[in-house]
Amino acid sequence: MDHAETLALYDREMREGARPESPDARVERTGGVVRHVGGEGGWHGVLWSDLDAEGADAAIAEQVAYFSGLGREFEWKHHGHDWPVDLGQRLTDAGFTAEPTETLMIGETSDQLVDAVPPEGVRIVSVTDPAGVELMVEANEKAFDRDGSVLRDLVLARLAADPDSIVALVALAGDEPVSSARMELIPGTRFAGLWGGGTAEAWRGRGIYRALIAHRARIAAERGYHYLQVDASDQSRPILERLGFAPLTTTTPYIYTP
């Protein structure tokens, strides 16, 4: 993999060329910025920008005014290679709050097509209905110790509106949900996004995380996707590096609340 070439492709397809996440959402391009305006309960934010030092502050102020006019909290999804180099500081000065930085990691789908299976007694199940979503949310709450309402709403909405755009999975030990993950598929791109992979503490280190990646990679390959993309936490980055994923840049959510 050519890292610079792959990162440029990711910027073109997934950021500058972003698609709306739902039928009632929209993507707008204005003043060197690509922003996403979510539908009911959806995500609002800036996905990509092409700014210079002279115009950055004005562009930031324009987005603040726009989303404030809608009464919406929004996220500026800042990547480590974005210009100008002090964009993060400019966002902070404008009233944004930075959340923990993650690492954008890319793997080639073909490299993940391995015979990785969960441990004995654990099976991976596709989530296709509300009952399955509840199992997925329960596993997510165990893994991350946080409320899973946002995940519930997101998966239910995507399954209802466009089930081909999401692959949702839960790992069950008997009838107990112990891990979950999802994959987002955007037609016309070469990237499948891996999201939400998390395992209950008592079940970590047994290969479930790896099995969930391999399971999603097989589906992505069958549907013609060449790359797998992950926004990796410090906890998952070393695991993904061992599996052949390459760190290409950092990504930091900057949040503005009107």
Image (tube, grey):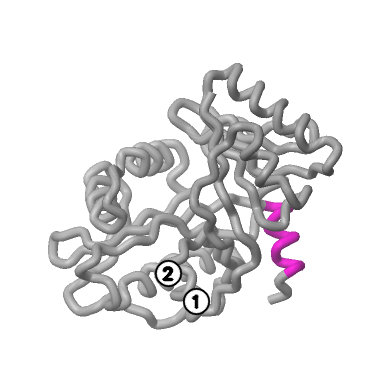
Coordinates of residue 198 in the picture (x, y in percent): 34, 61
Q: Are marks 1 and 2 in contact (CB under 8 Å)?
A: yes
Query: First in sequence: mark 1 or mark 2?
Result: 1
Quarter holding the N terminus?
Answer: bottom right
Q: Is residue 45 above or below residue 212?
A: above
Quadrant housing residue 110: bottom right
- Residue extending farthest front: 93
Q: Which residue is mark 2?
A: 213
Coordinates of residue 201 in the picture (x, y in percent): 24, 66
Q: Is residue 180 left or right of residue 29?
A: left
Q: Is residue 59 above or below residue 112?
A: above
Q: Is residue 56 a member of the stretch shown in magenta?
A: no
Coordinates of residue 216 in the picture (x, y in percent): 44, 65
- Residue extending farthest right: 54
Residue 138 in view: yes
Q: Is residue 166 left or right of residue 248?
A: left
The type of residue carrying mark 1 is Gln
Residue 17 in view: no
Q: Secondary structure at mark 1?
A: helix
**CA neighbours of label 1 inside 10 A, class few (<14), some (14 to 19), many (20+):** many
**CA neighbours of label 2 inside 10 A, class few (<14), some (14 to 19), many (20+):** many
Mark drawn on residue 73: none
Give the residue displayed 13% in from the left and 66% down from the top.
174
User: How many marks can you see?
Assistant: 2
Q: Secondary structure at mark 2?
A: helix
Quadrant housing residue 32: top right
Depth order, front residue of 89/180: 89
Q: Is residue 55 left or right of residue 159?
A: right
Region of the chain picked out in magenta, as a range = 4-13
Q: Which residue is mark 1?
A: 112
Secondary structure predominantly adopted by residues drawn in magenta: helix
The type of residue carrying mark 2 is Ile
